[in-house]
């Protein structure tokens, strides 16, 4: 029976992932992890201070580059609520089309892209937190996935324009993180969706995602090394 099951071809998603029935578990897992981190921010003393991204600390405490994308402002529940609602909307659209592995890779590399934008463009002494960078990557990925659907593109364009304006005019919103996550997310989505069908499609997709991830991590490392010197 095992041999027979292996011989059955697995159903594939639109972009080559393994098709799975049921709920988008990666999307729900991301939301659950953000909720858990937010709970820990409230109950563990100084937890938030240990996980936010501060450019001058990133060299010695590199985990902040990623953990900051799972932390949210304790000053307003609206921060995490809006971000998680956005993750839910984007995730339910993207995860079934990309597959679980491609979707989580897209999310994480977009989160790193958001941190890269902050490292390159923000005050190195400022503290940044939130899933907005990763969410911006998901949102730009929707543009890539639905690039032939003009009606959907118009609606998403309006939302994108409003978010872009808010990032520049509303205090406390990191437009740098939004920009970094959006650019990296769009490139990652292109690496997944623009590869034509064929026996090597998955290999090419993951090689391109690996190169993109290595490039983002490399620039982050250089930035963290460079920023630390003036503040030694």
Image (tube, rainbow, N blue to C red):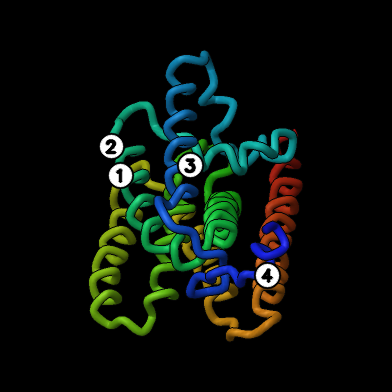
N-term mark: 4 or 3: 4
Residue sitting nearer the eye, 80 or 13? 13
Q: Earlier in the sequence, mark 4 or mark 1?
A: 4
Task: Name the quadrant of the C terminus.
Answer: top right
Q: Secondary structure at mark 2?
A: helix
Q: Work out how far the residue at label 4 is from the one at label 3, CA to CA, in angstroms.
A: 31 Å
Q: CA distance from mark 1 to mark 3?
A: 17 Å
Looking at the picture, tell me which residue is in the foreground, 178 or 20. 20
Q: Earlier in the sequence, mark 1 or mark 3?
A: 3
Residue 89 in the image: x percent, y percent? 33, 55
Query: How many residues crowd mark 1 within 10 Å: few (<14), some (14–19), many (20+)?
Result: few
Name the side, left or right, on which 187 lies relative to 150: right
- Image quarter of the N terminus: bottom right
Quadrant for residue 31, please give it.
Answer: top left
Image point (30%, 44%), residue name: 82
| Label 3 sits on residue | 29
Visible residue check, residue 117 = no
Q: Is residue 191 above or below residue 76?
A: below
Categorize mark 3 by other alpha carbons within 10 Å: few (<14), some (14-19), many (20+).
Answer: few
First reached walking from the N terminus: tag 4 or tag 2: 4
Q: CA distance from mark 4 to mark 2?
A: 49 Å
Q: Residues within 10 Å of mark 4 (few under 14, many from 20)?
A: few
Task: Say which residue label 4 marks.
Answer: 7
Q: Secondary structure at mark 4?
A: helix
Q: Residue pushed farthest front?
A: 1
- The residue wearing badge 1 is 82
The answer to whether the residue labelled 1 contacts the one labelled 2, judged by CB atoms less than 8 Å apart, is: yes
Q: Is residue 133 above or below residue 72?
A: below
| Element assignment for label 1 | helix
Query: In the rendering, which numbered label is found on residue 78?
Result: 2
């Amino acid at each position: 029976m095992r041999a027979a099951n292996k011989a059955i071809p697995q159903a594939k998603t639109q972009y080559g992932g393994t098709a799975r029935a049921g709920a988008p578990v990666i999307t729900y897992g991301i939301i659950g992890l953000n909720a858990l981190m937010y709970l820990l921010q409230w109950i563990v003393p100084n937890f938030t201070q240990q996980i936010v991204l501060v450019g001058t600390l990133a060299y010695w405490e590199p985990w902040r580059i990623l953990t900051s994308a799972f932390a949210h402002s304790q000053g307003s529940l609206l921060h995490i609520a809006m971000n998680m609602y956005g993750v839910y909307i984007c995730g339910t659209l993207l995860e079934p089309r990309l597959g679980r592995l491609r979707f989580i890779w897209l999310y994480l590399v977009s989160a790193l892209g958001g941190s890269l934008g902050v490292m390159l463009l923000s005050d190195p002494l400022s503290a940044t937190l939130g899933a907005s960078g990763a969410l911006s990557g998901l949102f730009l990925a929707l543009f890539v996935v639905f690039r032939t659907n003009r009606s959907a593109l118009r609606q998403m364009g309006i939302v994108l324009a409003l978010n872009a304006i808010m990032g520049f005019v509303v205090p406390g919103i990191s437009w740098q993180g939004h920009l970094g996550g959006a650019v990296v997310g769009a490139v990652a989505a292109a690496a997944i969706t623009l590869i034509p069908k064929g026996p090597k499609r998955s290999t090419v997709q993951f090689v391109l995602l690996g190169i993109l991830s290595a490039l983002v991590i490399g620039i982050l490392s250089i930035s963290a090394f460079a920023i630390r010197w003036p503040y030694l």
